Image: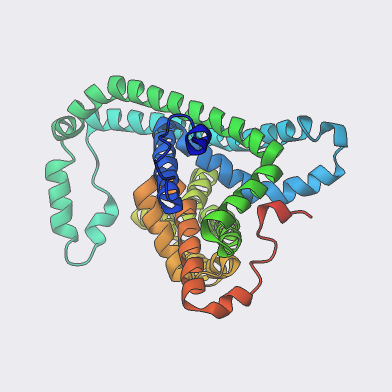
Amino acid sequence: MDCEHNAPEGTQANEPPAPPVVQRISRILAASALALLGLWILRHFLAALFWSTILAIALWPLYRRVERAFPPRGRRIALPLAATLLIGLGLIVPLAFAGMQVAHEIGSLLRYVAELRHSGLPTPGWLMRIPGVGAPLAEWWRDHLNDPQTIKALFGRVFTHIPADSARVIGVEILHRLVIFGFTLLTLFFLFRDGEALSRQLLRLSHRMLGPSGERVAHHMIAAVHGTVVGLVLVGLAEGILIGFSYALAGLPHVVALAALTGVLAIIPFGAPIVFWGAGFYLLAIGDTGAAIGIVAFGLLVVFVADHFIRPFLIGGAARVPFLWVLLGILGGIETFGLIGLFLGPVVMAALISLWREWTDPAVLDEPPPGGAAWHRHGQ
């Protein structure tokens, strides 16, 4: 009678309680199903969440320093709002400038192709000077590219359909990017505002899921973000500036656009050579052999120093991950997730290496975590 009276509603008195193991498994399955459902619902906004998280982690030390000097009454709304707007402007202005440059160059390219359809492509004088194959290449060029009808056959159909189709596709893509950018800034505002509390919650969650090693893994992941931002973004932009000086000395047109393109592609390992090799071939084609050799040689030197000394120290050293695994994480992340994989790949590698070391080398447990890596300790 007492058992029946005290039994939970909806259960039989003689029914034994569920074993703790069954409850834990059920909770894990339910939590996993809910997490997957949530990711599926947010699938179109995951890029905004990833980018805002990366920006917040990368800029958190600077934000904390500014916060200490900011009036207490404005730290809840005014400071995160101002920081978000400044970051938004810092991203919009270069992108708008790059967009105008690209639009200008595309217009020039279209006009040049329109002229080729009426006059053909003249044979360059340097083609005959190539040892061994110069004469047959020049003859092929005259037979195929000097004729305006051939140029029309090559480009006519393409340029008949591209403008209408590309305008619609580009417009939809720009609108989509603007929406993602807006949600990125919105999420970044809340991360700045509530970042300290959120970091404590995430550390407690990692401790509950992974035990004592959870906080250490979180430290290494955050350190990987910092190392990747500095090692890829800042070093890549520095490569663009340095190699841009060689473009200016060689007298190349559109030096600023070329330097910016070099810096952007230099963020991706082995990306910068695409630009300066192309610039070298252009100079070689117009007969400036010395400048072509100088640009390529200087570019290779800058990339060699950056990729073999500076980036391994900044990226691998920050998260204590061998640079080979960082490089594999970057390249694999780009292939799998696109541009966001630049940062997501090294973070995943840092977490895996951290777990591997703790499971295979107990002495690692006595080592301190990466200095200043924890989000909630930045700026303190």
Q: Is there any visible trace of residue 298 in the rendered image? A: no
Q: Quadrant of residue 53?
A: top right
Q: Is residue 19 visible?
A: yes
> In the drawing, does residue 30 fall left or right of residue 227?
left
Q: Name the foreground residue: 254 vs 146.
A: 254
Q: Nearer the viewer, residue 377 or 95?
A: 377
* For residue 24, side relative to residue 63 (left or right): left
Q: Nearer the viewer, residue 150 or 326?
A: 326
Give coordinates of residue 83: x percent, y percent: 71, 36
Q: Residue at x 63, y 33 (%)?
A: 88
Give me the residue at 80% from left, 43% from top.
67
Kindly indicate the quadrant of the structure image that contains residue 135: bottom left
Q: How is the image coloured?
A: rainbow
Residue at the front extreme, as displayed: 1
Query: In the figure, 234 relative to 170: above or below?
Result: below
Across the whole image, how many numbered discs are drawn on residues? 0
Q: Is residue 6 above or below residue 196?
A: above
Front residue of this view, candidates 379 and 257: 379
User: In this rendering, would 34 be left or right of 247?
Assistant: left
Q: Quadrant of the C terminus?
A: bottom right
Q: Is residue 223 left or right of 263 when viewed as pictured?
A: right
Q: Give the x, y percent position of residue 171.
A: 40, 22
Q: Please determine whether, in this image, residue 227 is positioned above or below residue 24.
A: below
Residue pictured at 35% horizontal, 22% vertical: 167
Q: Position of residue 128 (x, y in %)?
A: 22, 57
Residue 145 rendering spot, x and y as whole percentages: 18, 41
